[in-house]
Image: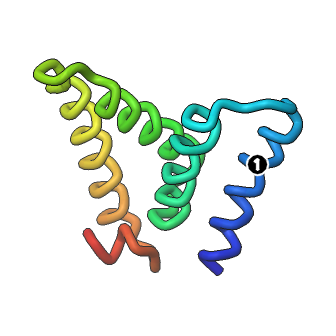
């Protein structure tokens, strides 16, 4: 069930925060939680999840007017995922979008 997968992923992040004993609200929670939820909804494998997080982070943190390279990387990654899903369709949200 999708909600259990999301809950599990978020709990893993929270467990990591608890183990550290302190955390940065944005770096440790506000940035990774939405990415974790998105990765679960789109059923990214671990490699795709890491790439997506990296590319989204680059786009969000790029200076205005200089984010073209970051957007191109994110677009290329998205195209690769779309092609992969088209060649290996499954029963997930991303496949239904493709």
User: Residue 41, percent across and down?
Assistant: 49, 67
Q: How many marks?
A: 1
Residue placed at 24% from the left, 48% from the top?
79
- Compared across the picture, whether 12 is left or right of 32 comes to right
Picture layout, residue 41 above or below residue 77: below
Task: Specify the color scheme.
Answer: rainbow
Q: Is residue 26 left or right of residue 74?
A: right
Q: Nearer the viewer, residue 50 or 30?
A: 30
What is the residue that sits farthest to the left in this orientation? 65
Q: With 45 as the anchor, is 77 left or right in this view?
A: left
On the image, which quarter does residue 47 sit in? top right
Q: Quadrant of the C terminus?
A: bottom left
Q: Please say if 27 is above or below 41.
A: above
Residue at 51%, 41% (x, y): give it.
Answer: 31
- Residue 52 in the image: state x and y as whole percent: 42, 41
Q: Position of residue 60 (x, y in %)?
A: 32, 33
Q: Bin the neighbour count of mark 1 within 10 Å (Cα to Cα): few under 14, some 14-19, many 20 and up.
A: some
> Residue at point 19% right, 25% down?
67
> Dividing the image into 4 quarters, which one contains the N terminus?
bottom right
72 vs 15, nearest the viewer: 15
Image x and y of residue 76, in percent: 24, 38
* Quadrant hosting residue 65: top left
Front-most of residues 75 and 8: 8
Residue that carries the numbered disc 1 in the rendered image: 14
Q: Secondary structure at mark 1?
A: helix
Q: Residue at point 46% right, 79% down?
A: 91
């Amino acid at each position: 069930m999708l909600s259990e997968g999301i809950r599990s992923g978020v709990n893993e992040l929270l467990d990591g925060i608890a183990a550290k004993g302190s955390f940065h609200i944005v770096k440790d929670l506000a940035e990774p939680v939405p990415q974790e939820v998105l990765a679960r909804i789109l059923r990214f494998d671990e490699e795709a999840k890491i790439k997506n997080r990296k590319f989204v982070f680059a786009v969000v943190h790029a200076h205005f007017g200089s984010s073209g390279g970051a957007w191109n990387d994110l677009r290329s990654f998205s195209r690769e995922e779309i092609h992969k899903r088209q060649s290996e369709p499954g029963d997930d949200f991303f496949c239904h979008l493709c």
